[in-house]
Amino acid sequence: MKTHTIVEKYATAYSCDEGRLSGKDDSQSSIHYPTVFLFIGDKAGDAIEPMIRINERKWDNSAGVMYIHALSRNADVSAIASGDGGDGSRIARLVLPVDGSHGPDKSKTMRRDVYRQFYEHNRGLFELNRILRQVSSDIAEYGRLYASFDRIHLAVVTRVDDPLNVLVPEITLLADAIFQQSFKSVQMDLHVLINEREQADAFGYASSAGVAYLREVDYMQSPDYSFSAPLHVTEDGISIEVTHPASPLFDLVYVLTDKNERGMSTFAEEDNYEIICHMNLLKNRKQTGSGHLHLMDNYNNTSLRNNVMTESGRYGYVSAGLSKVARPNHSIALTVLYHFYRGLTDRMKAAPERTQAEKLAWFGLDPQAIAARVDRVVSDEELLSDMNGIMTHGISFGQLKRMTLREAEDALFGSGCHAYFRDNYEQVTDKALQQLSDDELVQMVRERLAVQADTSFYHVYDWTNEADEGGSVWPLLHGRIRDASRALEAARAELEQKYAEAVEEQSFSRMPLMDKHNVRNFIRCFFNTVYRLKLEVLRLETGLRLYRKYEAELERLHVIYKKYVQQMESLEETLRAAALTSIRRADDYIGQNIMEYYERVTADIMQEIEAKRGSDAFGEERYMGSLSRLLEQGTEALVERLCEVCRTHILTGPPFRQTFEEELLQRANVTIEYSNQEVLSKDELFKKLYRTLEERAGIHVRLLDYTHEHRYEEKYFFGDATSEFMRYALGEEETSRIYKLGCVHEQRTSGVEKLNIMGGFQIEDLLYYRNGQMYYERYVENGYQFHGISSELLPPVR
């Protein structure tokens, strides 16, 4: 099994297990009245599937929610969920008899043409009527899912630059008229999506079309807006007027852009879809007894609507921002695995400081160890005494004393001494050296690594790295080899010099007229000087041969453990990349400081284990055992063991049993000095989380001045109102805050969300509107026609 597969399987299993534990008691909210989402325009279709998934995750009666998509006849529907009101699907597709395709020859009158085409095709209007009636009928089949059928909520979603939004009043009011035949009232909201990032290439026309639509929205929301058109079409082709008396068309209009108040676009487009879903839940949530028990401020739609109205009677527009937090278990599992691995490797690399001499001694290559090996392979010098028994040739001392020692040896013994030394010393030594294993050091190092916790193959690699003159044993070893060579040369020179000396120059006892006595004394002196020197030369030769042998073995050791180190470095990169990839996939807020925080958490747990079981605990078989032995089986064996130990002994530690609030608060404050963590109060930590949630819930709209005169705000948490953090958040700035603060109580342990609502701004406050205004006016001057109705009916370009 590949390393990546093993790691991903481990993280997924942990995330699933934790999800079952932390989220098993989570409850979903219910919506009170039936809800229909009406998406107008080809571009709006992108929001349908994401919003279905969001609602299914959040609402336990989401199966009864209907979705309608009104699109042009030439739209690319390959990526749009199909269905119509007749087959029981919750997604109804209204293909309008209009041409919504773009092109240089069409754009000049595109919106006006869409408007005219809509009214010119009676058959298309009938089909629109039929499908809306079918949707209204289908909703009745989900009666058991709703608490009341007195009202229906209609949420209209459109893109500001989609040409089909020129038909928003027609489609919306027809739906309103048809739904009113089944429900006592219809509450309608409009959600306008602005995507500024897409307009980098076609900013001129797109901005002009967007400004045109915002002017129309301003018209629809004016107190004296009225509408009348023959939109009701029967099966017999008879048309009936649909009328709207003087009043704003929508209850509330929400404007959501892909940039927040600060001009930052760090969030995904799906975040706006989540805001739409949350807003619809907020105003249409089924109240539970537990909600009232917690004395929370409940959302009041009428109050919000009144508070965003100006003194002159103009209705203000609304926007929102959403932040959410949950424990990112998948990212945590991978991050902890990476830091656990780093902790192990750091321990393997961090050995007590050793001098080069101590490192050589660890390999058994110090002078004493080499001398001991020489002693084992070179025969004892006591055998030299047996040389006195070697047969001599008859020669007088008078003949010997003028000879050199070499001449005297030849005269006395011939080749006998050479043969004796060769047989009893040189050949014995040579045989002993040949019997030494070529992997003597390799095996010795392997055994030492298995039992010595303070030394690892990282050290073996470093110490045998010839390129690292500062930390390796090579400079000292080469120095020792040079010293041994020089000592050998000196000993050989001394031996040659001794052989060249005259017999009469030697120091031994001589007695006049005692020839044999003087010869015997000379022979004893000869063996004690010359052959002891020859034995020393042999010992030095043997020591040098041993050094050469171990020099080659050290090179092999470096190759072996270089491969291990490379495997470890490659695995570290793999684990780090896996953790960072998972963190990037998480929301940037949810994933913040995971690396930093869990580095500390993992280090603490590892230290606790070592405090209980000893500094070499992770070398025990119940934990990692020998990493070098695992690597001998392959990297996968090491990874399997890493995951097992991490899951069993690290991820079960106390820091991983925190509530998500505690975990996030700890993580959010990871930049605080760790030594000061004990003195930080819980209130301070909660304040940090509260403020961070607030910052991440920035309003998704860019205004010219976001401290505008009529700014009105409400803020809501979605989570367990009984939790410690939620109690703090609801009480924060209770006496001084100027906004309404509330909580949608949901029995949950897996996370918390915050929805910030801001309203009271006007169309002309939008920076998007201000920036696009000059394009709109210039395009109009150049003959572009953006409106289906007379532009004289529209409010002035402000």
Image (cartoon, rainbow, N blue to C red):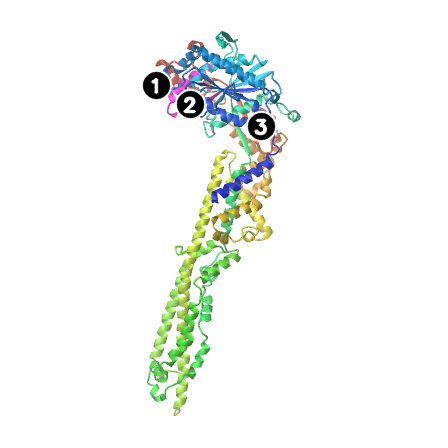
- On-image quarter of the C terminus: top left
**Is 681 situated above or below 508?**
above
The quadrant where residue 743 appears: top right
Q: CA distance from mark 3 to mark 2?
A: 39 Å
Evaluate whether residue 676 shows in this view: yes
The residue carrying mark 1 is 104
Q: CA distance from mark 1 to mark 3?
A: 48 Å
The residue carrying mark 2 is 76
Query: Marks 1 and 3: which is nearer the front?
Result: 1
Report the magenta residues as a range.
190-216
* Membership of 210 in magenta stretch: yes
First along the sequence among labels 3 and 2: 2
Please state the horizontal and vertical placement of residue 318, each as a whole percent of the image. Answer: 51, 20
Q: Which mark is residue 717?
A: 3
Label 3, secondary structure: give it: strand
Evaluate whether residue 321 shows in this view: no
**What's under tag 1, amino acid-wise?**
Pro
